Every structure is written in structure tokens, then in C-alpha cells.
Image: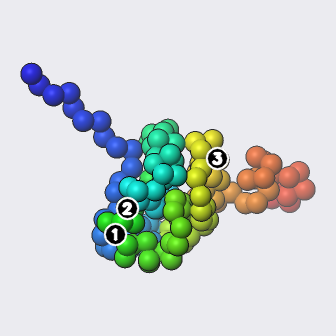
Amino acid sequence: MARPPTPTKPYTDLTSRAAVERLMSPGGGTGVIDFWAPWCAPCRAVAPHFEAVAAQHVGDAPAVRFYKVNTEAHPELAAAFNIRSIPTMVLVHDGEVQDVVVGALDARRLSAKVDWLLSRARGEGFWTRLLGRKPAATAAQE
């Protein structure tokens, strides 16, 4: 009997310094990195939420990519980001850390963070991100 195809993960496992350097270089794009370990119960609780949000954003424009770093297997990658506690999510855009969230996030809160990161990637300013539109005085000046 043929096996059903293994579903593709909506995230990439970061396992090398070179992969992190590509992501963190100018033009590296927009990404969410989940630092976790197999023994960490909160990390295991976050995993299905992370995967669900990653799956929701497949094909987004601008693209946001999702990554996981197993801190047990790759402590040097966690050290490069000064990770001291897990779970930790690092949100990056074009080689710059935009935000760091320490602790467990549910799907709703993670999705809100990703939406915020995408708005920054689109170049939307503070007022657009806050209000969903430009304030009247700013729009009239343009």
C-alpha cells in the first residue's frame, strides 16, 4: 500500500549559521523565528498555534516566512540572538529585529504580531498601523 504524501510544514527549521546569516542580512525578508526545545512544555503548547498561523500566511504578499530553532540541538543559534528563556519569538524584517516576545503566545496573539510585522514590511507608518488608515491631517498634506 502506498503511503499518503507527508504534508509540507509551513515553516523551516533553521539549523545552520549560514541560514541565519541569510535571514538576518539586508534584504533577508520578513520572518518569525520560534526558539524552542523538546523538553519545554510551554514550547510544545505553542507549537500547534505557531504552525496554524504559519499555514494561514502561506502565499502572503509581502511574504512572511516562519522558522523554528531547536535550542537544544543548536545552542549556538540561540546564543547569536541572546536567547535566555524559551519559548521566545523573534520578529525580523530585512536583517533587523523588530520585536521579541518571551513566553507562550496563542494563535490570536501571534497572528496579531504577524499582522503588525507585515504592516511594517509594507512600510505603513505608525498612524496607519494604529488606526488602519492615515489620519485626515496627514492625508491632506500629501
Residue 107: where, in percent of width, then height? 58, 42
Occupied quadrant, residue 3 = top left
Task: Indicate the position of residue 71 as horizontal and vertical percent values.
Answer: 39, 66
Q: Where is mark 1, residue-wise? A: 74
Q: Quadrant of the C terminus?
A: bottom right
Numbered tag placed on residue 109 in the rendering: 3
Q: Nearer the viewer, residue 93 or 6?
A: 6
In the image, what residue type sits under mark 3? Answer: Arg
| In this view, 29 is above or below 57 | below
Q: Specify whether 54 is left or right of 128.
A: left
Q: Residues within 10 Å of mark 3 (few under 14, many from 20)?
A: few
Q: Is residue 19 left or right of residue 1?
A: right
Q: CA distance from mark 3 to mark 1?
A: 27 Å
Type of amino acid at the residue the image marks with label 2: Asn
In depth, the one of 78 and 85 nearer the eye is 85
**Among the two numbered marks 2 and 3 on one chain, the one whose residue lies closer to the N terminus:** 2
Q: Nearer the viewer, residue 77 or 114?
A: 77
Residue 39 in sight here: yes
Badge 2 marks a residue whose secondary structure is: strand
Could you classify mark 1 by the number of other residues whose Cα lies within 10 Å: few (under 14), some (14-19), or many (20 or more)? some
Task: Mark 3 or mark 1: name the one nearer the start of the chain.
Answer: 1
Circles 2 and 3, Cβ within 8 Å, touching? The answer is no
In this figure, which residue is indicated by the disc labeled 2?
70
- Identified at 59% across, 44% down, the residue is 106
